[in-house]
Amino acid sequence: MDVSDLEAAFALPLAEDTSFDTTLVGVLATLASFATPLAGVLLAGYVVRLVRAGDRDATALPSFDDYTDMVADGARLSAALVALQLPAVGLATAALPGSGLSLATLTYATNPAMLGLLGLSALETVGLVAAGLAALMGSYLSVAATVAIAREGSLVAAIPVTRDLAFDRSFIGVASGVALVGFVAGLLVALCAAVPAVGTALAATASFYSLVASATLLGRGAPNASVLDVDASRQSHAGGVSSGSAESMESA
């Protein structure tokens, strides 16, 4: 991933070839996702489509069509994202049983001052810290799984690709870039939502724009399968050379 990938990701929604209807449908779908998770599944499917398009260096936003396939992709991605966060939710629930826990509660695991104000015991604090780390790892794996599902179109086939991406050092920079875009976008959406009268519409627009930028950046920046295979071959070859050298030294 380089600066050109970042520029392309932010320019795509404003590209001349991008249809206004596509942008309008995307904003409306984002607006609907604030009220119903069904629209969120549709948006998840569009994220998969954006990653695929970014992987091919698209010059315009992909259209909202083939809704059946899009919902199927969204359901697969949603299932993967939920599954990857279950360990964090389980750890946090064990640390704070009966607290009406939500994923937002996991943020306390990174704020020692808040933990003290809540009057948590040492064991509960350790549990929440473990939950926070699990949530962080789940988020990283979720980014890798998004790319894998976009490329493979199958949850089962995406598992080995997710593993390869997660252990690829170059992907850490891509995931960090996507996380930074998401963080800045969250601040922008919050500012837009605070605008009187039109805040919700502005927040939906900013949210869709950031979703497009993040997904496109992920598709363009993630290493492809051939690069991963080359890296694996190099490691295997290096291991073979090291073994051969050791055997030669022993025989000498």
Image: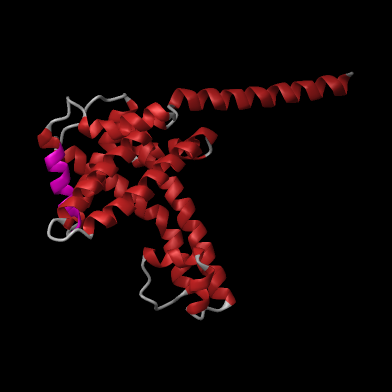
Residue, x 41% and y 31% (percent of image)?
221
Q: Quadrant of the N terminus?
A: top left
Q: Where is residue 175 drawn, in percent x and y?
A: 44, 41
Q: Quadrant of the C terminus?
A: top right
The quadrant holding residue 63 is top left
Q: Nearer the viewer, residue 232 or 215?
A: 215
**Residue 6 left/right relative to 74:** right
Q: Where is residue 59 drawn, in percent x and y?
A: 25, 24
Specify whether residue 207 is in view: yes
User: Relative to 97, does residue 165 appear above or below in the rendering?
Assistant: above
User: Relative to 32, does residue 24 appear above or below in the rendering?
Assistant: above
The quadrant holding residue 156 is top left
Residue lying at the far front in this picture: please name it: 196
Q: Nearer the viewer, residue 46 or 243?
A: 46
User: Relative to 237, does residue 175 appear above or below in the rendering?
Assistant: below
Residue, x 87% and y 20% (percent of image)?
251
Magenta stretch, residue numbers: 23-34
Q: Where is residue 228 drawn, in percent x and y?
A: 50, 28
